[in-house]
Image (cartoon, coloured by chain):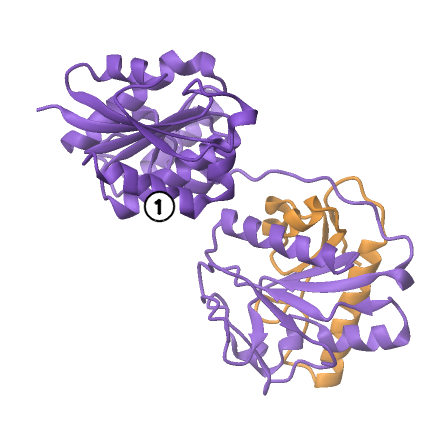
């Protein structure tokens, strides 16, 4: 899906837990997420801490969208 | 007894015309037309082409269901034992027509059907699972090779003979897995394969992996403050109760849901349809998969222009690559039409 959206001409960032799959299917901007059942959260934390984690991942995603790349790139810290 | 075959070809191979005649409606003629001659030679006395259906490629492509129904009705009068479609080589609309018709014949008439296409013909990806498509070269120059292979496969299917592997029979892999007994254990076979690989010798995998293609990255966003962001997910987030019944695995559809005025995905209103991960956490707080709450805050702060008022969702769990591709093509089309300029896609 990421690739078809990219192919249509829209910049897209893939926030996902299993980075190797994302790389295999051909996503270009990849932001690694927390865990499979809660990619943008962490139920072991308080709701506020979770939201903070989520905010950081979304900010990272926006940064990825604003970064010029020429090949598949995984945006770690 | 000789089997009764109906042959399907397009306007070009029928000698009616090229693109300018591509919108002709289907017709059926008794006996052989065009490449049917080669097919007849390949069948010998085993089978006879009783009729040929001709249809314009554009007519078929723009009226797929109608054309299929019309053609099936025409075919029934001739009580065929099998259908041969094409070969279509690398002609996209022709391949799609042969494919759609092949699927319709399989489903509605329940008789063998064989087509022939170049592996990159879009008809292959769309219909290879539905029936047998013989691999052909990419142009009609390969007719002499394609037709005998197609004829041979049809006869085998008609006679109920056991088919070998796709490579042995010359048809395109349909993704059907069959159990088979070997004298050697899997571990020994794996080691043999590995040793062959190390020696640079040829070996054949027992489980080919799907091939994925690549798309170049789009340019980065220059001005985030002018950006309209949309959310898409394969994590199955949907309104509570899954109103469109998106399947928990092997999804056949995607959902489009309005989030105008929604600032938080609460457990009262949203859940996940996904059957491939523990739904507990997403059902408690769907923002953990689809970060609407945070994006609404950032939208308010003016970090970007707008969060699109619709999100798109499907279940990425055993869902066919071809289906995902189809969903995303449609989703992207709608997003662009709605003025969206960037996408965050989340996957579980």
Q: Quadrant of residue B136?
A: top left
Q: Quadrant of residue B78?
A: top left
* Residue B176 showing in the rendered view: no
Residue at screen point 85% across, 46% down? A68
* Residue A51 in the image, given as x and y percentages of width and height: 75, 78
Q: Which residue is mark 1?
A: B69
Instruction: Report which colour depicts chain A.
Output: orange
Q: Quadrant of residue A49?
A: bottom right
Please tell me whether mark 1 sits on a helix, a strand or a loop.
Answer: helix
**Dot 1 surroundings within 10 Å: few (below 14), some, or many (20 or more)?**
some
Quarter in which the C terminus of chain B is drawn: bottom right
Residue placed most toward the observer, B263 or B337: B337
* Residue A2 in the image, given as x and y percentages of width and height: 65, 52
Q: Is residue B83 above or below residue B37?
A: below
Residue placed most toward the observer, B169 or B15: B15
* Residue B324 in the image, given as x and y percentages of width and height: 54, 52
Q: Is residue B294 left or right of residue B56?
A: right
Q: Is residue A67 above or below residue B282?
A: above
The extreme bottom residue here reads: B268
* Residue B31 showing in the rendered view: yes
Q: Is residue B277 above or below residue B208?
A: below
Residue placed most toward the observer, B277 or B136: B136
* Residue A76 in the image, given as x and y percentages of width and height: 76, 56
Residue placed most toward the observer, A65 or A24: A65
**Chain identity of mark 1:** B
Residue at screen point 12% across, 23% down? B2
Q: Which chain is purple?
A: B
């Amino acid at each position: 899906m990421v690739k078809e959206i990219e192919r249509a001409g829209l910049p897209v960032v893939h926030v996902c837990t299993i980075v190797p799959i994302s790389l295999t299917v051909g996503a270009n901007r990849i932001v690694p997420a927390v865990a499979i059942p809660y990619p943008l959260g962490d139920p072991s934390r308080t709701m506020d801490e979770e939201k903070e984690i989520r905010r950081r991942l979304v900010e990272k995603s926006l940064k990825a969208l604003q970064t010029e790349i020429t090949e598949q790139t995984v945006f770690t810290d | 007894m000789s089997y009764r075959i109906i042959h399907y070809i397009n306007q070009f191979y029928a000698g009616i015309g090229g693109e300018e005649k591509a919108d002709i409606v289907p017709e059926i003629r008794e006996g052989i037309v065009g490449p049917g001659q080669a097919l007849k030679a390949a069948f010998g006395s085993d089978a006879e082409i009783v009729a040929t259906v001709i249809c314009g490629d554009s007519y078929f492509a723009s009226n797929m269901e109608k054309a299929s129904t019309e053609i099936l009705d025409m075919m029934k009068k001739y009580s065929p034992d099998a259908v041969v479609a094409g070969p279509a080589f690398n002609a996209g609309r022709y391949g799609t027509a042969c494919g759609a018709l092949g699927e319709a014949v399989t489903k509605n008439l329940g008789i063998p059907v064989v087509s022939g296409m170049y592996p990159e013909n879009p008809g292959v990806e769309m219909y290879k699972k539905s029936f047998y498509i013989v691999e052909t070269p990419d142009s009609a120059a390969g007719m002499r090779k394609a037709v005998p292979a197609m004829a041979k496969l049809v006869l085998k299917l008609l006679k109920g003979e056991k088919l070998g592997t796709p490579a042995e029979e010359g048809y395109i892999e349909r993704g059907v897995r069959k159990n088979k007994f070997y004298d050697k254990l899997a571990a020994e076979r794996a080691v043999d394969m590995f040793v062959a690989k190390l020696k640079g010798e040829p070996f054949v995998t027992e489980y080919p992996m799907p091939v994925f293609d690549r798309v170049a990255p789009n340019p980065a966003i220059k001005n985030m403050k002018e950006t309209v962001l949309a959310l898409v997910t394969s994590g199955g987030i949907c309104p509570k109760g899954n109103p469109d019944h998106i399947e928990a695995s092997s999804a056949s559809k995607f959902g489009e849901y309005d989030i105008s005025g929604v600032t938080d995905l609460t457990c009262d209103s949203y859940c996940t349809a996904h059957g491939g991960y523990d739904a507990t956490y997403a059902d408690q707080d769907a923002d953990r998969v689809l970060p609407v709450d945070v994006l609404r805050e950032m939208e308010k702060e003016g970090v970007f222009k707008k969060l699109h008022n619709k999100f798109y969702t499907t279940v990425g769990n055993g869902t066919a690559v071809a289906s995902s591709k189809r969903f995303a093509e449609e989703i992207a089309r709608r997003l662009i039409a709605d003025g969206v300029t960037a996408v965050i896609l989340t996957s579980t």
